[in-house]
Image (cartoon, rainbow, N blue to C red):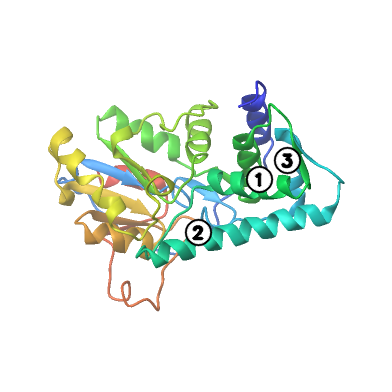
Amino acid sequence: MRKDSKKYIRNLLDNLDPLIPIPTGVKPRFKRDENIKGVVFDIYGTLLVSSSGDVDQAEISDKNLERALHASGIKIVDGDRETLDYILNDFNSTIKVCHDAGRMNNLPYPEIDILSIWRIVLIHAKRKGLIAIEKDADIALMTCVFEFLSNKVSIMPGLKETISSLRARRIPLGIVSNAQFYTPVLMNYFLHNKISLKERIKGFDKELTVFSYKFGKGKPDQTLFNELIPTLKWKYGIIPSEVLFIGNDMLKDIYASNRVGFKTVLFAGDKRSLRIHENDIRTKSLKPDYVITHLEQILKIV
């Protein structure tokens, strides 16, 4: 990254308007479960309040793109808004091509690497003479700025207290999330007030952390959850039924984690992100083990 990239990201995140969870009206349902030995979380809509409700539903705009390009040392040659529209259209088209290719290769829930997508799109624009990329241009910074502006997030109330308490009790903590390379940047900022470009989120076991973009597939693909099972067994002696998974989506989180044997908690703490999937046959008769409306209620289960 450029020398001032971390400073730019901190300033951007410091100045985002905070998001307040919108009550769902759902009644919590939980009790103490003495069998739980490990806890695994979803991120967007669960640990982070998300303006769009999920990582893959951001509201993109040419204004956000223009700011991101400027911040990262990529110049629009003619300063033409049609160039911004072209880049955004190519961005969406490239994602669709990658998703379609994944489905043709028997991946029902293909996932992209957003940084690779932007590199392809910017190469297209450069070849057309629409942009000039400076020698120290920072595409990773450009991606972070665009995503942080397009899908604004805030810390979910009770996040720090919940994670701190679980860690103090030496409970192994993991993550399975539809996420990108910038997701740990957000989590480390909100949890520890640090701008770190490392993939690891401090406080969570790196070997129990699964981000969809690293595997080319997204939830509800159950293989993402299966990735945790060997490590849980050999490192901690934990079997799936002793793991609690917390997420806001009945299909991507509750259904998928239930299928691999995890205990499930539906997080119904924000109306923006609560996904029930009432008409999906996979979730119609499915009941989560517990329902919570605030993260600290996890401490009354574990």
Residue 141 falls left or right of residue 101: right
| For discs 2 and 3, the disc positioned in front in the rendered view | 2
Which residue does the image show at 51% across and 56% down from the upper left?
54
| For discs 2 and 1, the disc positioned in front in the rendered view | 1
Q: Which mark is residue 166?
A: none
Measured in 3D between alpha carbons, the distance from the residue under mark 2 to the one under mark 3, in whole angstroms, is: 23 Å
Say what amino acid the circle numbered 1 marks. Answer: Ile
Relative image position of residue 66 (x, y in whole percent): 76, 45
**Circle 3 is placed at which residue position?**
69
Relative image position of residue 254 (x, y in whole percent): 32, 60
**Circle 2 is placed at which residue position?**
98
Quarter of the image where the N terminus is located: top right
Mark 3 crowdedness (10 Å alpha carbons): few <14, some 14-19, many ≥20? many
Residue 175 falls left or right of residue 55: left
Quarter of the view holding residue 291: bottom left
Above or below 252: residue 9: above
Mark 2 crowdedness (10 Å alpha carbons): few <14, some 14-19, many ≥20? some
Above or below 219: residue 177: above
Element carrying mark 3: helix
Q: Using the rendered image of the protein, determine whether residue 271 is visible from the camera's viewpoint.
A: no
**Circle 1 is placed at which residue position?**
123
Measured in 3D between alpha carbons, the distance from the residue under mark 1 to the one under mark 3, in whole angstroms, is: 13 Å
- Please state which of residues 183 and 250 is positioned toward the viewer in this rendering: 183
* Residue that sits furthest to the top in the current view: 3
* Residue that sits furthest to the front in the current view: 127
- Please state which of residues 51 and 183 is positioned toward the viewer in this rendering: 183
Specify which label sits upstream in the sequence, 1 or 3.
3
Say what amino acid the circle numbered 3 marks. Answer: Leu
Which residue does the image show at 12% across and 37% down from the upper left?
237
